[in-house]
Image (cartoon, rainbow, N blue to C red):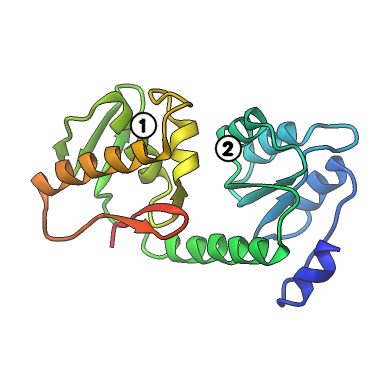
Amino acid sequence: MLSSYLTQYDMEVICAEEPYIGLSLLTQHQFDLIILDLTLPGMDGLEVVQKIRENSNIPIIISSARDDITDKVIGLERGADDYMPKPYDPRELVTRIKTILRRMVVAQPKEQKEELFTVDEKSRIITFKGNLMDLTAAEYDILSMLVHHQNGSVSREQLLYESQHIDDDSSIKNIDVIISRIRQKIAHIDDSKSYIKPIRGVGYLLTTK
């Protein structure tokens, strides 16, 4: 049903009923995006995400009837770009697909330019324009995720649940507070523009343009 629906929006869809077939198809064709269920024969979908990420950065949207928060967290931690618990309006899926693909197109040009932000994961240090940023543990978690997804949107939920130093029971509003503090610290170095922009109804985007 989803395949038929997506073709109405000029999307070419190839379906794989088993994960091993899907993984094999990835070596035979050039795809722009994967829509992945979790309850699959022979291999759990979360394991599939991990196997895909061993060789590819292709965007992955998990579409599953499993709405347990643990599945969502693990899926995003293993490299999925989005998680949509069923049931949902297929129009929302179309919107999310277009958003991710647009983000990928925007992120590709001029990637060889000198990086404004650099992240040292071992030392948990972030520099901006060569200046060391004085960040709390939670601020580092949030900013490093935005840097890794620079020029692409990141949801508040992803920022909350993937952070190692923010309680899962914290309010989504806490993310907004932390983002505000990070913005102020960036502005102390360069206040000529806003590098972190809100994406209405989604989350935030760190722009390097």
Give the number of marks: 2
Q: Is residue 129 visible?
A: no
* Left or right placement of residue 130 versus residue 152 in this view: left
Instruction: Tell me which label, 1 or 2, sits earlier in the chain.
Output: 2
Which residue is at 72% across, 77% downward?
10
* Left or right placement of residue 65 versus residue 203 in this view: right
User: Residue 194: percent from the left, percent from the top?
Assistant: 21, 57
Give the numbered dot on residue 35: none
Q: Mark 2: give few (<14), some (14-19) or many (20+) Cα within 10 Å.
A: many
Q: Mark 1: give few (<14), some (14-19) or many (20+) Cα within 10 Å.
A: some
Q: Which residue is mark 2?
A: 76
User: Residue 113: percent from the left, percent from the top?
Assistant: 30, 57
Q: Is residue 57 above or below residue 44?
A: below
Which residue is at 68% across, 67% downward?
91
Q: Which residue is mark 1?
A: 141
Dot 1 falls on a residue whose secondary structure is helix
User: Distance between the Cα atoms at labels 1 and 2?
Assistant: 15 Å
Q: Is residue 30 above or below residue 127?
A: below
Question: What amino acid is labelled 1 in the image?
Answer: Asp
Dot 2 falls on a residue whose secondary structure is helix
Q: Is residue 139 visible?
A: yes
Which residue is at 35% across, 44% downward?
147
Residue 175's image quarter?
top left
Q: Is residue 194 above or below residue 119?
A: below
Residue 180's image quarter?
top left
Q: Quadrant of the N terminus?
A: bottom right
Of 24 and 42, the residue lying toward us: 42
Question: What amino acid is labelled 2 in the image?
Answer: Leu
* Left or right placement of residue 168 versus residue 134 in this view: right
